[in-house]
Amino acid sequence: MRAIMIITLIFFSTLISCGTSGNAEKDGSSKTGQYQSSQPTPLFNADSAYYYIERQVSFGPRVPNTDAHRKAGQWLAETLGRFADTLYIQQTRVRAYDGTNLEIKNIIGSFQPENRRRVLLCAHWDSRPYADYDPDPEKHYDPIDGANDGASGVGVLLEIARLISQKQPNIGVDIVFFDAEDYGRHRFSNIPDQDSWALGAQYWARNPHRPDYFARYGILLDMVGASGATFKREGFSMLYAPDIVRKVWEAGQSLGYDRFFLNRDGSYITDDHYYVNMIRNIPTINIIHQDDTTEHGFFPQWHTTADNMDIIDPYTLKVVGNTVLKVLFQE
């Protein structure tokens, strides 16, 4: 890593929520578009992204306060640090919905930190402590691997980080891995669900890695690796950043990924991007798998012990990675 900045901020905060959605399908169609890039776009390596996901999952469930979480966080910081111009480690303590104090770590890599024109890319790196939607009731308090819900977005962004460390776009890029997104209220808990999700994003939005931080826009990746994924225009994304949704969907469709990036409005999902919009006022969108066929509106293995490497499809990773890269390099 070329430079490292350590930010240690101990703070007890209150919490956040990752709601519900809806749709699913696969494969790209052969559409050709007129979406023009200002410079050649690197080709996304899906095998590399798949490896980064597999490596995260190999540590075990990345639940805050566990050894697996600490080891995975160290590996993520070291890996992102090899690619970024500047690495920030933002450590803090937050209080979960059930009163548990969580030691968390947001991991931030900045490229061209001197460039005032910036784009924010983000994903959450922790995994759910409860498989509360598992079909087996005996597993409802078991932690999950979170291969798709968490690790997939991080894997795509690590590969993007690797590529832009070799050939940078015309803008500065900040990649943020948020912690404690998935430590929200258990499905069967009687405790109110007020702001019990996205704890790391809430903290970062109030205490960014640079006090004056601002980006032109942000893109959140969540659940972007499953076979058959489809991405509808998420509600809060359209409310706060409709132009960015159109920019990203146009890029994906111009690459022939129409069957992934659907021209349909989706549900409002309280995810990390919600707090980046609400607290930090950075127009940020969410590329997230929504599925009309499930009761909760997400991919079928969501918040179950089946969210593992078996459901990860390299082609879906390629679709999302190439789309985000095209957006970056057309700036």
Image (tube, helix red, strand yellow):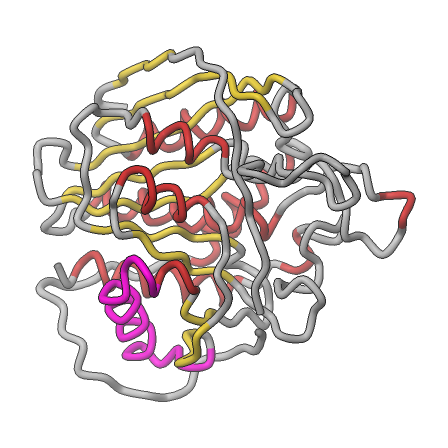
Using the image as rendered, state which of residue 8 and residue 237 is in the foreground. Answer: 237
User: Does residue 210 appear left or right of residue 318 in this picture?
Assistant: left
Asked which quadrant contains residue 34, the reply is bottom left
Asked which quadrant contains residue 196, the reply is top right
- The residue under the point 82% across, 43% down is 140
Instruction: Specify the quadrant that holds the C terminus.
Output: bottom left
For the stretch drawn in magenta, the main secondary structure is helix
Is residue 39 depicted above or below 172 in this figure? below
Using the image as rendered, state which of residue 319 and residue 42 is in the foreground. Answer: 319
Is residue 175 depicted above or below 305 in this figure? above
Residue 258 is one of the magenta-drawn residues: yes
Using the image as rendered, state which of residue 294 and residue 30 is in the foreground. Answer: 294
Residue 70 percent coordinates (x, y)? 57, 20
Residue 27 percent coordinates (x, y)? 50, 79
Q: Is residue 138 visible?
A: yes
Residue segment shown in magenta: 238-259
Is residue 217 depicted above or below 243 in this figure? above
Using the image as rendered, state which of residue 129 and residue 186 is in the foreground. Answer: 186
- The residue under the point 57% across, 21% down is 95
Is residue 287 depicted above or below 16 in this figure? below
Residue 260 percent coordinates (x, y)? 46, 75
User: Does residue 324 appear left or right of residue 54 in this picture?
Assistant: left
Residue 130 percent coordinates (x, y)? 74, 39
- The residue under the point 42% across, 28% down is 106
